[in-house]
Amino acid sequence: MTRRNGIESVKVNLVHEKARVRFDKEQVSSEDLLKWIDSIGFKASLLQTDQASSQAQARKRAAKQSERREAVLITLSALLTLPLMLPWLSAWQQALLASIVQSVMGYRFYRGGYQALRGGSPNMDLLVAIGTSAAWGLSCWKLLSHGLDVQPHEHLYFEASAAVITMVRLGKWLESRAKTKAIAAMDAMQELQPQRAFLITESQLSDQVAAIAYRELAIDDLMVGDRVLVKPGGQIPLDGMVRMGESSVDESMFTGESRPIHKQVGDHVIGGTLNREGLLHVEVTALAQRGLLSRMIEAIEKAQLEQAPIQRLVDRVSAVFVPLVVFIALLSLLGGYAWHGDLEAASIAAVSVLVIACPCALGLATPTAIAVATGLAARRGILIRDVAALECLHQIKIMAFDKTGTLTEAKPRLIAQASWDAFETMHLALAASLSQTSEHPLAKALIEAAQAQGLRASRHFDRWQALPGRGIEAASGSQAWRLGSPSWVLQDLDQALLPEQTWQAFKHGLDQHVAQGYSLSVLAVADLDSDSLACGHTDGLAPRHTVSGGARGGWHVLAWYAFDDHLREGAKEVIRAVHAMGLHTALLSGDAQVLVKRLAKSLGIDEAHAQMLPEQKAQVLGQLRTRLGPVAMLGDGINDGPALAAADVGIAMGSGSDLAKQSAAITLMRSDPSLLIPLFALGRACWRTIQTNLFWAFAFNAIGIPLAACGLLHPAFAGAAMAMSSLMVIGNSLLLNRRLHTMENRLACLT
């Protein structure tokens, strides 16, 4: 291909007919770029990202018009070609019909071949143009040389050249229709974006009756902060936040979750999702070009533009394929003539070589499989950003997991509690009251536990303070309370206030849960001395003292609470499925050793690494790779970023941090580790599809070229075989969905 200064890289998506060009604006303008693309034999126009949806519709209409036009031309070509097979047609009549086919229907091959040759990248069009021209030219020469004495069906090959053009055009037409099916999922995502919305111009609530005024407008006219009305059964126009109303929303296209998601005031909604039954007022938080739908489509298209490692090998083969084919055809011509002394037979053999040796199937083998696979992944709620990771999935030997937020919900729950007296319920209500203004996960767990028992956190405090790393301290009247880590609360404990037997039983339960790795909080109370009361710390934020000041007689323990981070639903089944695929499992966490090992044992994970810093997780992955082979990592937090980047395949949870998602090659759009099952099934099915595609692409050429070179393959049959190879490659890619279902069912049976 011709080089151009200022152009750094070119990535082409054959299936979507798009290209991403990176260039230096100081050396090359957009107009220069389009002229350069035209000079190497291609037509191109700039894609405006803010008009992607409308441009997609325009491309779809243009594709349909092109298909109809092509169908007409193929029909005419076939109608002109069929009479060439009739025995009573004269040689001159054959020449007339074949010349029309060659010049009119074959024009596209001359144009494409010339542009490709001018650009320094000979392609299939050039092979077809040379081959059919040779057959047509040889027949014309025979006709002019022998005049009326020529026997048309013994010495002329007009029907061969016409049949080749017809078959190749038919193959290209069927190929175009098959490619349209291959990107059906992407088209469906493009069409999800509504074009109109109802902007709320006035909304007020009077006597429990809502008065709403709104007007319809294009979504391009909306601004961030606008409020839109979403009617029952309507689509949510843009990403936003619910400001009024309650409903269930179908987000299956984005997350793969088949059940509608309940939405209420304060919840985020995604543009393009379907509102089921309620009336919603949604405040726009992102415009169309920056919404989740646009970002997903952009990420998928970017991934499809990337070359899988095996495709780079295919490209290197294709670069020398056309010159090699021309050389074989020339060798067949000269060798056949030298061996048999029959120039006609040698010429026909050379034509057959040129016709059957179409590199089209070879070029489509990987991109079509990748396009279908990324579309299937998106429909299951899996966003693939890097196709190299998709190809690498079948090689993975180790599956490593983060703990918190990945295998667990990152939402601690109260699992055990104990009180030294009979007022356990009252103490839980007190602990919930202390936790009201805290954002700590354990504080939220206490509030949820109290609410589950119907308790109200109604106590108010004069002074309240959160002490990082320790807990909460508050005071009201002549009493103070502490709720926090055992080491902090118990350091000032006055053990004399408790009966020895009661204290020992209390302490035994506390120590037992600490040893098992559970998170613990202790609640204690103290009477304030008179000096502390005189201080009058009304704001609760004394600069050098805690809010309680001094406690008279020490602290008196009331209760302790044990928390556990519950497993995500289906976590055990995921580990069993990963083992069923023959993978080694590892757990990497920053939590305490006892807790991590207990979780690994309960799930059946092969090995566990605890108290890991972010950089240490990446180092452990490197050691696992050296010991066992390629490794994949599933994580969600900021501390997982280095590990996700270091893994051969980094997989981020949809609920994870932005850093985790950016570091990962694959994102699970909903926080469900069970999506690993279809992901690995898809990776393996996609790899097998690519292998099968390449087999067919090479097999047709490996068998057909020698037969054609030996004169055993007629040019018409060579054209049909060439078209068939491309169709088989695309058809095989379209069967990927069936293979995926089969593999998913097989894994489900194994687990």
Image: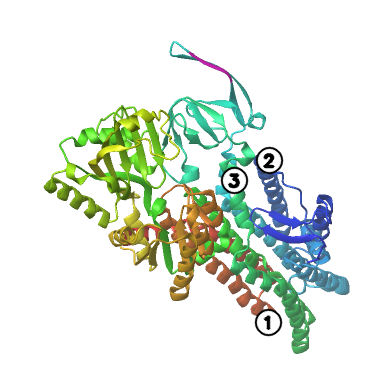
Residue at which label 3 appears: 295
Indicate the secondary structure of the residue bearing disc 1. Answer: loop
Q: Nearer the viewer, residue 443 or 345?
A: 443
Residue type at mark 1 is Cys
Instruction: Give the farthest residue toward the left.
Output: 501
Whether residue 519 is visible: yes
Q: Which residue in the protein does label 2 denote? A: 50
Seen in the picture, residue 220 relative to 313 is either above or below; the reply is above
**Disc number for residue 164:** none
Residue at figure coordinates x 51%, y 32% from the top left: 241
For the residues carrying marks 3 and 1, which lies nearer the camera in this image? 3
Residue labelled with disc 1: 710
Dot 3 lies on which element?
helix
Based on the picture, tell me whether residue 476 belongs to the magenta stretch. Answer: no
Q: Earlier in the sequence, mark 3 or mark 1?
A: 3
Front residue (pair 115, 20) = 20
Residue type pointed to by label 2: Asp
Query: What is the spatial separation of the Cα atoms under label 3 and label 1, in whole angstroms?
Result: 54 Å
Q: Position of residue 228 (x, y in %)?
A: 56, 26
Tell me which amino acid carries mark 3: Arg
Name the magenta segment's main secondary structure: strand
- 130 vs 193, left or right, is right
Name the quadrant containing residue 310. bottom right
> For this rendering, which residue is in front, 540 or 152?
540
How far across and how far down the image is residue 698, in percent?
60, 73
**Observer-nearest of 2 and 106:** 2
